[in-house]
């Protein structure tokens, strides 16, 4: 009798467990399915757009390398003169000018942006933070063409008045780099401030508990703990500086600064690393050629796709480096 009762009890428990499982089973909802499909479609469109851009750049770049007379891959990456009209296709003058402008921008943006981020995260009150953050966002929202005219009409005359008109040319990479640095300060400060703010308060309290000052806590505890996020912000800012177009097109110059390898050591005025002379970056060249009256399938026209592909590869490399740095130095807190 007891065995029969126990069997009935076990059967009842099994039925109740099946009922509970059926109740807890995920129910299909039309709205969630539609939202999931929409999100997947957005992701697919983004990926396909990137693939399409790479395909078009690669296709036109291959036409430039294999259908243009006088173009070789080795000469393209090692040549020091860029004059497609006379079959000189060395991209190094454009690359060095881009690196020069980006380096000057980083010297401005990285320390100022990081200092701003530390102040907003560790020192500023909520009222001050709510005031400064929108101001920084305004800087980020100003059109880059306005920054370009600011560099040309204000920064360049200022440099010429300080250093001399014989030293600083009207078009130069120094003024363009300085203004590009101002442009990306909000990007550096915003991303770095988010990384600093994500550090647990317990680390700060522990540092204060052993007698550390606020400055020591900020520089020796919070900053190392947020290193991965700050480094990623720096790399993203570098990518932004490399890809900047209108500022360098207006303020840096409209012609490549060709050079000889001997000029790098013996002739500073002709070196590609002189920031006070005019030069043309990769993006500036693309703007100049794209806005001209060149016909299709000419060497100048086809060259912009090769340079665009090179820019894409540089930016992709920086993004991959950023992800590796984040994965390497990421701190996980519980």
Image: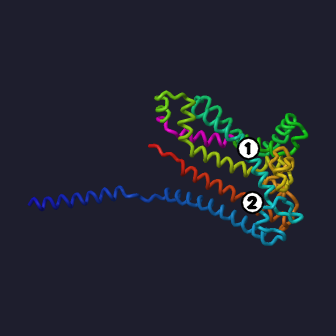
**Residue furthest bottom as drawn:** 67
The residue located at (82%, 50%) in the rendering is 265
| Chief SS of the magenta region | helix
Task: Classify mark 1: residues with Cα within 10 Å, few (<14), some (14-19) or many (20+).
Answer: many
- Image quadrant in which the C terminus is located: top left
Q: Is residue 189 visible?
A: yes
Please check the rendered image and state whether residue 200 is part of the magenta-colored stretch, yes or no. Answer: yes
Q: Residue 110 sits in which quadrant?
A: top right
Disc marking residue 308: 2
Please check the rendered image and state whether residue 286 is part of the magenta-colored stretch, yes or no. Answer: no
The residue located at (59%, 30%) in the rendering is 123
Mark 2 or 1, which is nearer the eye? Answer: 1
Sequence-earlier tag: 2 or 1: 1
The answer to whether residue 114 is above or below residue 249 is above
Q: How is the image coloured?
A: rainbow
Task: Classify mark 2: residues with Cα within 10 Å, few (<14), some (14-19) or many (20+).
Answer: some
Disc marking residue 321: none
Image coordinates for residue 6, horizontal then vertical, percent: 15, 59
Who is closer to the viewer here, 283 or 217? Answer: 217
Image coordinates for residue 126, horizontal then vertical, percent: 58, 30
Q: Residue 181 sits in which quadrant?
A: top right
Measure the C-alpha gap from mark 2 to mark 1. 21 Å
> Residue beneath label 1, please?
105
Image coordinates for residue 64, horizontal then vertical, percent: 79, 68
Asked whether, in this view, residue 294 is left or right of residue 243, the answer is: right
Q: Secondary structure at mark 2?
A: helix
Bounds of the magenta span? 185-202
């Amino acid at each position: 009798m007891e065995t029969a009762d126990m069997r009935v009890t076990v059967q009842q428990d099994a039925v109740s467990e099946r009922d509970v499982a059926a109740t807890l089973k995920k129910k299909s909802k039309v709205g969630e399915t539609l939202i999931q499909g929409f999100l997947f479609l957005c992701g697919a469109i983004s990926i396909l757009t990137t693939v399409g851009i790479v395909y078009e750049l690669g296709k036109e770049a291959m036409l430039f390398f294999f259908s243009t007379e006088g173009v070789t891959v080795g000469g393209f990456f090692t040549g020091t003169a860029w004059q497609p009209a006379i079959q000189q296709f060395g991209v190094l003058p454009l690359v060095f000018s881009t690196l020069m402008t980006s380096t000057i921008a980083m010297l401005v943006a990285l320390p100022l942006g990081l200092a701003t981020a530390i102040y907003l995260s560790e020192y500023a009150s909520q009222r001050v933070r709510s005031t400064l953050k929108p101001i920084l966002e305004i800087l980020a929202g100003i059109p880059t063409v306005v920054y370009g005219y600011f560099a040309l009409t204000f920064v360049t005359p200022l440099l010429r008045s300080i250093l001399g008109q014989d030293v600083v040319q009207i078009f130069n990479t120094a003024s363009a780099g300085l203004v590009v640095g101002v442009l990306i300060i909000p990007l550096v400060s915003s991303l770095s401030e988010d990384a600093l703010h994500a550090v647990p308060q317990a680390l700060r309290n522990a540092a204060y508990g052993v007698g550390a000052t606020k400055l020591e806590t900020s520089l020796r505890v919070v900053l190392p703990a947020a290193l991965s996020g700050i480094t990623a912000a720096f790399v993203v800012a570098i990518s932004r500086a490399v890809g900047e177009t209108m500022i360098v097109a207006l303020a840096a110059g409209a012609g490549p600064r060709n050079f000889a390898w001997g000029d790098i050591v013996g002739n500073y005025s002709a070196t590609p690393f002189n920031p006070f002379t005019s030069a043309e970056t990769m993006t500036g060249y693309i703007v100049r050629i794209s806005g001209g009256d060149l016909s299709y399938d000419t060497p100048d026209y086809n060259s912009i796709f090769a340079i665009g592909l090179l820019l894409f590869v540089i930016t992709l490399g920086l993004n991959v480096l950023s992800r590796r740095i984040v994965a390497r130095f990421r701190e996980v807190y519980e």
